[in-house]
Amino acid sequence: MVGGPRWGLSVPLAGVPLPAHRDLVRSLPDLGYTDLWSAETAGADAFTPLALAAEWAPRLRLGTSIVPVFTRGPAVIAMSAAAIAELAPGRFTLGIGSSSPTIVEGWNGGVFHKPYQRVRDTLAFLRAAFTGAKVSADYDTFSISRFRLERPPATPPRVMVGALKQGMLKLAANHADGAITNWLAPSDVATVRSAVNDDTELVARIFVCPTADKDAARALGRLLISSYLTVPVYAAFHEWLGRGELLKPMQDAWASGDRAAANAAIPDSLIDELIVHGHPDACRERVASYVDAGVAVPVMSVLPTGGDPVEVVRALAPGR
């Protein structure tokens, strides 16, 4: 673990405009939060929220979770990361990963091919580019000719790899500065850690739904689980974690086009394992159990509950 206990928040919050995050972000260090991590799917890009946060809260550590390696060219990733590293010297971690065919091909018109190799090659290129050296190299999945960052960061960002199964986890452990994972229960952390080194920093994105309405939390959890755990990479991850048979009825129904049956096939016990829900105090304790299991940085992705998201974040604060 770097710099003592850490506790993160995923931004932007659902339903809150980017400029309206300012006062909350400024207050996060005093509430006990140490980290702010951005995601990238179909909302805000990964870098813009962190550029704002770099100015609003100079004590927070910033990270991307994750930047897909297929949706930007390697040089563009290097330039964007260098800009955030310049705004937040020594406080920025670039998380990269393969993402999924839906995002890469369906939404971005790209080609999802050899994801392990593309992540490995992008990692190697970024290491070279951040030094300010001119890079000319033929990697397995792309070639670079005479690229040099015009503004190399004085403090290069740490680079972590989004990883689920053994291959990416070992890449993260052996060649990156840590691993970023998600969609796991505290009981799964030991399995994930078994694939990395003892000193590998592990960041985990955790879905948190702070509400006493158990039925509402489980209904939202069902929608998320059926959307994510039917994706092949996540299905394979949970098969490795030992949930293959448990998830098969949902995955079969989803593959047949019966979304209602897929949601109905998800047992409450699985939702309770993978989605943190309940009173904010209970949620805080549950998130802390990930740390006890071996996660260095739990990053809460707060799900909508109908309440004020800003107040929810304050209620979940580790410093309470």
Image: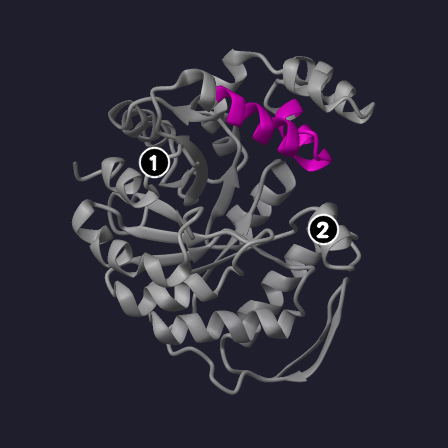
Q: Amino acid at mark 2?
A: Pro
Q: Residue 259, position in %: x, y?
A: 72, 24
Q: Residue 66, position in %: x, y?
A: 54, 53
In the rendered image, the vertical position of residue 191 relative to residue 41, given as above or below: above
Which of the 4 image quarters holds residue 256? Answer: top right
Which of the 4 image quarters holds residue 139? Answer: bottom right
Protein image colouring: one colour
**Principal SS element in the magenta part?**
helix
Residue 255 drawn in magenta: no
**Classed neighbour count for the residue bearing mark 1: other residues with Cα under 10 Å, few (<14), some (14–19), many (≥20):** few
- Counting the numbered discs, the total is 2
In the rendered image, the vertical position of residue 279 relative to residue 147, given as above or below: above
- Residue shown at the point (57%, 31%) measured from the top left: 224
Write down the region rendered in magenta. 218-239
Q: Residue 62, position in %: x, y?
A: 37, 58
- Which residue is the site of mark 1? 307
- Looking at the image, residue 198 sits to the left or right of residue 74; the answer is left
**Picture disc at residue 115:** 2
The CA span between labels 1 and 2 is 39 Å
Is label 1 or label 2 in front? 1
Report the residue that reaches farthest toward the front.
306
In the rendered image, the vertical position of residue 80 relative to residue 66, given as above or below: below
- Residue shown at the point (52%, 72%) measured from the top left: 80
